[in-house]
Amino acid sequence: MTAQLLSANHAAALAATLAARANRKGKGFVGGVYPITPSTECMEYLCNQKIEKGRVVRVESEHSAMGVCIGAAAAGARSFTATSSNGLAYMVENCIAAANLRLPVVMAVANRTLGPPWNIWADQGDALLLRDAGLIQFFCASNQEVFDTVLSAFRLAEDARVMMPVMVSMEGFILSHTIAPVEIPEQALIDDFLPLTDIPHRLDTAAHTLGQVELPHHTECHRFQHHTAMLGAPPVYDAIRQDFEAIFGRALSGAVVPYACEDAETLIVSMGTIGITAERVVDELRAAGERVGSLRVRLFRPLPSDDIRAAFAGKKRIAILDRNISLGLGGVLWSEARALADPGAVVQNYLTGLGGGDVRPEHIAKIVADITAREISGAPQLMEAV
């Protein structure tokens, strides 16, 4: 194990490179890439790596980048791409195709605000655009977590019980361009962790097609199978976490990351880097005698409802912070998680950091002060209105 100073973009690309090399005795690796800020450096790094069996294909659009991955995975290869914002929006059609065809493509997304007006800063709305499309979705809070999650995503996506794309999200610039130490395992350990890619329904020399027309009943069956497989992904991921720790000697973050939750009366819930800031606020408030905890949701699809419900149990006040908005409703995480709280709990949504605005400790402290003063839940609040 060695430590390298890497941005999250480079950490994602290095994880993909090591996973690609681990499949050198199998059907190899293919990456389809097209640049878009702030994910471009991920692709540039990947293009400069030596991969013994495989290639990185530079195409003319994000739509084609995912098309390359679909073709590669359909042929049985390990596949990877990266994108962001409007590039992901342009890729949506093929993301849905990859999911419906149950192809285990891994994708890194540097979260960026959708435009126009054009904004290159962090907002989770781009990834959440695909929350209903059949891709597994992770949200990371550190460069190390990006590396570990991308590496593990290949194992999860390619598991015969799962077989679907996995998206690994990191906030643009906040992580994508920030340099931090990342522990990198030796290739031999990566080889032990990642089995050779085996896609049961890959194309071969026999008569075999993908994407043919089907009747309504067939679609119903396929959607139900896909839904069932997604619901079954968390226990598969838990087993992967055990192998990860056994092979690499350190823990892989779970579907949720609780922090000082056990005796908390007030809980701060978030996804991504806001969770790290929230933990700092928890330390400061606990030093002042307040019983506050943090819950960071890493796995958003499938939503780990049982884990969230267990963390919410007994909590009087739950502040859910969203760096995203479902227009006409409120924060996306809040809209799905609020029903998991105990009856009578105050569950308040705070829209914060939209369009890449800073979310600082003092902002979260104000949110805690606001929810502490509430007796009932209200409409979603912009942080500036707190």
Image (spheres, rainbow, N blue to C red):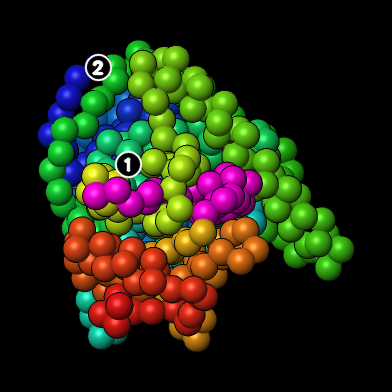
Q: Position of residue 238 (x, y in %)?
A: 55, 31
Q: Look at label 2 and name its amino acid.
A: Met
Query: Where, by quadrant of the figure, is residue 158 drawn?
Result: top right
Q: Is residue 334 left or right of residue 122?
A: right
Residue linked to disc 1: 146
Q: Residue at x 38, y 49 (%)?
A: 291
Q: Secondary structure at mark 1?
A: helix
Q: Which mark is residue 133?
A: none
Q: Could you say which is closer to the camera, residue 338 or residue 159?
A: 338
Q: Position of residue 245 (x, y in %)?
A: 42, 20
Query: Is 254 contained in the magenta span?
Result: no
Query: Where, by quadrant of the figure, is residue 40 drawn?
Result: bottom left
Q: What crowding class fits label 2: few (fewer than 14 Cα within 10 Å), some (14-19), or many (20 or more)? A: few
Residue linked to disc 2: 1
Residue farthest right in this picture: 217
Is residue 352 in view? yes
| N-terminal label among 1 and 2 | 2
Residues drawn in magenta: 288-315
Q: Secondary structure at mark 2?
A: loop
Q: Residue at x 52, y 75 (%)?
A: 376
Q: Position of residue 93 (x, y in %)?
A: 52, 68
